[in-house]
Image (cartoon, grey):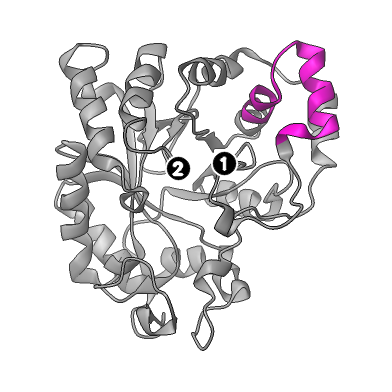
């Protein structure tokens, strides 16, 4: 399995298992299946609501000697209602308790959006807190404290723009190691990827297969189905593999980390085997033409009326 070296010398496997949308009752077996297949990277988040079950899968896998803790890279994310500096360490400690771990390998600020501490997801603008009241730098200083306390080896951000990352780099004490963002052939993120790579920050691609199974409430009508793209299908036929496998290997070939989600044992195995494919220059050029700057997860659910957040401000 290929890995990337982070800016502090630590390494991260380029391929991992995503757990967003994995339901309770399914995610434990998915984690265990993935680790048996050979996965060495599990991506989690508090808001996914399944970290306790992920923790059960990890703990049982360690006890059964499927894999050692130190050989698995485990990521989680700080939710939006824990952005005040003094809330960051307690939030991470809760995640560690749920995952039954002593430390995380990577902890990310999930979104550049802040909620009131008592709000899990706001119904209106009253549940939001502006970034002028709780700046991202305040949250970042809390993230740095998690490193200083030995609770996590690496910290980073998610869904952050170049401008927001630059602010952290210029004013923080620890440089982010990672930016996790939506990335696939319809949203190739070339400018952001170039910026991150030139500043020695790794990029993780989420929703690499187009997130077809996300909730209907955050879907657009008649949205393009990435797995059914004709160019991707043609390349898949060329190698006698699935379109999902082509999309995964495309992300790896670009030097990003990729975290496809699945709870199907067969698909978990297929996704893992994508690493055996090698795309040629012609394949990469054909896929490059597919970019349409299309977001499946556009952040509009945070842009509530009368709030300080707009879709534009979230991505700017």
- In this view of the protein, which residue sits in the foreground, 295 or 103? 295
Q: Position of residue 307 (x, y in %)?
A: 49, 85
Apparent side of residue 50 relative to residue 280 in the rendered image (left or right)? left
Residue 24 to residue 243: above or below = below
Q: Position of residue 79 (x, y in %)?
A: 33, 60
Which quadrant of the figure has residue 239? top right
Q: How would you rate the neighbour count of disc 2 (Cα within 10 Å): few for under 14, some for 14-19, many for 20 or more? A: some
Per the image, the residue denoted by label 2 is: 21
Q: Answer whether residue 234 is magenta in the image.
A: yes
The image's mark for residue 224 is none
Apparent side of residue 258 relative to residue 87 in the rendered image (left or right)? right
Q: Which residue is drawn at 19% across and 43% down?
A: 98
- In this view of the protein, which residue sits in the foreground, 187 or 126? 126
> Are discs 1 and 2 less than 8 Å apart at CB?
yes
The image's mark for residue 213 is 1
Q: Answer whether residue 223 is magenta in the image.
A: no
The residue segment tinted magenta is: 227-249
Q: Which residue is drawn at 49% across and 20% down?
A: 268
- In this view of the protein, which residue sits in the foreground, 47 or 194? 47
Which quadrant of the figure has residue 6? top left
Apparent side of residue 81 relative to residue 60 in the rendered image (left or right)? right
Q: How would you rate the neighbour count of disc 1 (Cα within 10 Å): few for under 14, some for 14-19, many for 20 or more? A: few
Label 1 sits on a secondary structure element that is loop
Q: Residue at x 27, y 66 (%)?
A: 82
- Nearer-N-terminus badge (1/2): 2
Residue 76 to residue 305: above or below = above
């Amino acid at each position: 399995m290929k890995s990337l070296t982070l800016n502090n010398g630590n390494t991260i496997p380029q391929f991992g298992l995503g757990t967003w949308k994995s339901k309770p009752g399914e995610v434990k077996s998915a984690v265990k299946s993935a680790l048996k297949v050979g996965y060495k990277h599990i991506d989690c988040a508090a808001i996914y609501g399944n970290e306790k079950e992920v923790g059960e899968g990890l703990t049982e896998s360690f006890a059964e000697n499927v894999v050692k803790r130190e050989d698995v890279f485990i990521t989680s994310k700080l939710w939006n209602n824990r952005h005040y500096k003094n809330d960051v360490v307690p939030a991470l400690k809760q995640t560690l308790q749920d995952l039954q771990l002593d430390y995380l390998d990577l902890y990310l600020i999930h979104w550049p959006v802040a909620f009131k501490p008592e709000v899990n997801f706001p119904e209106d603008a009253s549940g939001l807190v502006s970034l002028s009241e709780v700046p991202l730098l305040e949250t970042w200083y809390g993230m740095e404290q998690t490193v200083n306390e030995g609770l996590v080896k690496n910290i980073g951000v998610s869904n952050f723009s170049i401008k927001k990352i630059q602010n952290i780099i210029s004013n923080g004490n620890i440089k982010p190691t990672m930016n996790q963002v939506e990335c696939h052939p319809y949203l190739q993120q070339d400018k952001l990827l170039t910026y991150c790579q030139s500043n020695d920050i790794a990029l993780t691609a989420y929703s690499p297969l187009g997130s077809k199974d996300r909730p209907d409430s955050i879907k657009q009508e008649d949205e393009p189905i990435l797995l059914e793209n004709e160019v991707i299908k043609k390349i898949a036929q060329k190698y006698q593999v699935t379109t999902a496998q082509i999309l995964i290997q495309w992300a790896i070939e670009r030097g990003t980390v990729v975290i496809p989600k699945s709870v199907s044992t067969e698909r978990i195995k297929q996704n893992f085997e994508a690493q055996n494919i090698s795309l040629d220059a012609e394949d990469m050029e054909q896929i490059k033409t597919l970019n349409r700057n299309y977001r499946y997860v556009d952040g509009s659910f945070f842009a509530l009326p009368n709030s300080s957040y707009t879709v534009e401000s979230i991505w700017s």
